[in-house]
């Protein structure tokens, strides 16, 4: 009998916890909100040391208070010689944990990147690489957010991506190894909470 009572108590508490932690119910009750973000700016890949367009789009979840955010993100960068397509998951957390209208936040994440290389300049020599690569790596950054309304905010964000992918070129004449290094981006972001 004790075993049956224990099993019933366990099932009842599990059902209560499943109800309590259900993210759909949390969203419907206004405890969580979905956040869509578009970021536009400039990026620089260390190996070519050339600034060009970088942009990202993300979809995330945040509590109604908005003090943290978890997001899935796509980032694109192309400097004419190397292009980067990056997908990742990350978190943003406000420094004060009491963000109202404006605040500073920090962010961390893990990414998968695909790289398409055409030419690379190293020690004033241009190499025709024409190769592809991929890697997994972490990123970290900081940002400043300003909430215009409860639903809309803008932010400025600096992000450091530790790519560190190595590509080897052996064309019979040259045997060179390239380290892509880090990708840094600075973007202006527009976010809307649904």
Image (tube, grey):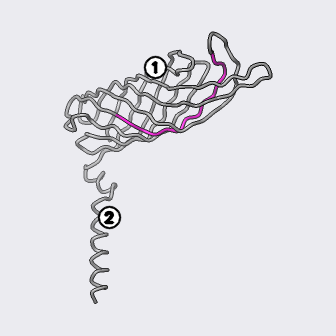
Instruction: Tell me which residue sits at (38%, 25%) in the image.
Output: 158
Q: Residues within 10 Å of mark 1 (few under 14, many from 20)?
A: some
Residue 76, how many percent across, how many down?
A: 52, 29
Up-down relation of residue 48 to residue 105 (above or below): above
- Specify the principal SS of the magenta part: strand
Residue 87, how many percent across, how many down?
A: 50, 38
Magenta-colored span? 107-121
Residue 170 bears which disc, if any? none
Instruction: Tell me which residue sits at (40%, 32%) in the image.
Output: 140
- Report the side of 99 relative to 11 (left or right): left
The one of 8 and 55 positioned closer to us in this rendering: 8
- Report the side of 187 relative to 78 (left or right): left
How far is the residue under mark 2 from the one under mark 1? 44 Å
Q: Quadrant of the N terminus?
A: bottom left
Q: Is residue 111 magenta?
A: yes
The earlier-in-sequence mark between 2 and 1 is 2
Residue 42 bears which disc, if any? 1
Q: Residues within 10 Å of mark 2 (few under 14, many from 20)?
A: few
- Report the side of 88 relative to 34 (left or right): right
Residue 184, how many percent across, how many down?
A: 46, 24
Q: Is residue 7 magenta?
A: no
Q: Where is residue 96, by image quadrant?
A: top left
The one of 181 and 157 positioned closer to us in this rendering: 181
At numbered mark 1, what does the secondary structure look like: helix, strand or loop?
Answer: strand
Q: Residue tagged by mark 2?
A: 18
């Amino acid at each position: 009998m004790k075993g049956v009572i224990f099993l019933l108590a366990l099932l009842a508490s599990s059902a209560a916890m499943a109800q309590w932690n259900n993210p759909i119910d949390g969203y419907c009750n206004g405890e969580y909100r979905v956040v869509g973000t578009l970021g536009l700016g400039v990026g620089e890949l260390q190996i070519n040391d050339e600034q060009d367009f970088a942009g990202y789009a993300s979809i995330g979840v945040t509590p109604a208070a908005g003090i943290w955010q978890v997001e899935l993100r796509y980032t694109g960068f192309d400097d004419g010689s190397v292009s980067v397509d990056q997908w990742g998951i990350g978190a943003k957390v406000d420094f004060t944990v009491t963000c109202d209208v404006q605040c500073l936040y920090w962010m961390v994440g893990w990414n998968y990147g695909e790289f398409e290389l055409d030419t690379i300049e190293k020690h004033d020599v241009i190499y025709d690489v024409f190769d592809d690569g991929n890697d997994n790596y972490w990123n970290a950054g900081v940002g400043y957010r300003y909430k215009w309304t409860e639903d809309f905010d803008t932010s400025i964000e600096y992000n450091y991506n530790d790519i560190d992918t190595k590509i080897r070129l052996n064309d019979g004449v040259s045997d060179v190894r390239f380290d892509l290094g880090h990708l840094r981006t600075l973007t202006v972001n527009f976010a809307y909470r649904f």
